[in-house]
Image (cartoon, coloured by chain):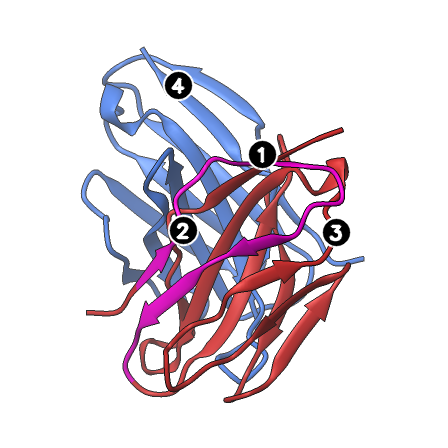
Chain colours: A blue, B red
Amino acid sequence: DVKVTQSSRYLVKRTGEKVFLECVQDMDHENMFWYRQDPGLGLRLIYFSYDVKMKEKGDIPEGYSVSREKKERFSLILESASTNQTSMYLCASSPPAGAYNEQFFGPGTRLTVL
Amino acid sequence: GDSVTQMEGPVTLSEEAFLTINCTYTATGYPSLFWYVQYPGEGLQLLLKATKADDKGSNKGFEATYRKETTSFHLEKGSVQVSDSAVYFCAPLIYNQGGKLIFGQGTELSVKP
């Protein structure tokens, strides 16, 4: 069974802390994505990656960075967490772009920044 | 730019009622179209998809038809169940951005017994 796992389901951090959210996929997918989900706004793309060490900015990259040192792992980093980064964070992976490019999602990490 | 407009929720229905969730999109090129579903406390999972005009995607009693002329992909189900309570997302896939999905804001469905 295909799987995308995220390191934590719930996380509470303080303003100014450095936060790491980890995502691992076991499907040998080239593409990986980080989204944040907020009520009324749907999912917004933060960063994505087509390959190891490759990254592209999504729609809302400010305040975030990413790292992809291995194909199966894609990390989202909040360099200095702020309260407006309290949100649900979803990771996804997919094979290369094509007609059936389904994205597979992890269960999400609900981050609260106090 | 590329965008998706979904029917606003929450939508509340009684069990066995007919469901329609409207979705229209603006996208460059000829996108594939997806509906994702998010059950409470879970991540998103693919519900159905369609890749060309007039294609009908179907799964678990849900259906949606790719209407190129009206740029729409409305989700329907003839008889909803309590277990269908979830948030539904319409998402075209934009190929010229490397397979980027554009998500609507989501429509929350609540089905009462």
- Which of B69 and A92 lies nearest the eye of the viewer? B69
Which amino acid type is shown beneath numbered disc 3?
A: Ser
Q: In this picture, which residue range is highlighted in magenta?
A: B4-28
Q: Residue furthest right?
A: A1
Q: Nearer the viewer, mark 3 or mark 4?
A: 3
Whether residue A84 appears in magenta in the rendering, the answer is no
Q: Residues within 10 Å of mark 3 (few under 14, many from 20)?
A: some
Label tally: 4
Q: CA distance from mark 3 to mark 2?
A: 19 Å
Q: Which residue is mark 3?
A: B79
Q: Residues within 10 Å of mark 2 (few under 14, many from 20)?
A: some
Q: Nearer the viewer, mark 4 or mark 1?
A: 4
The numbered mark 1 sits on a residue in which chain? A
In this view, B35 is above or below A19: below
In this view, A9 is above or below B37: above
Residue A84, quarter of the rendered image: top left
Which amino acid type is shown beneath numbered disc 2?
A: Met
Q: Are marks 3 and 2 on the same chain?
A: yes
Q: CA distance from mark 4 to mark 1?
A: 15 Å
Whether residue B9 appears in magenta in the rendering, the answer is yes
In the displayed structure, does residue A50 sit left or right of residue A5?
left
Which SS class for mark 4?
A: strand
Q: Which residue is mark 2?
A: B7
The numbered mark 2 sits on a residue in which chain? B
Q: Which residue is mark 1?
A: A7
Residue at image position (51%, 32%) is A109
Residue at image position (27%, 41%) is A64
Label 4 or label 1, whichever comes before in sequence order: 1
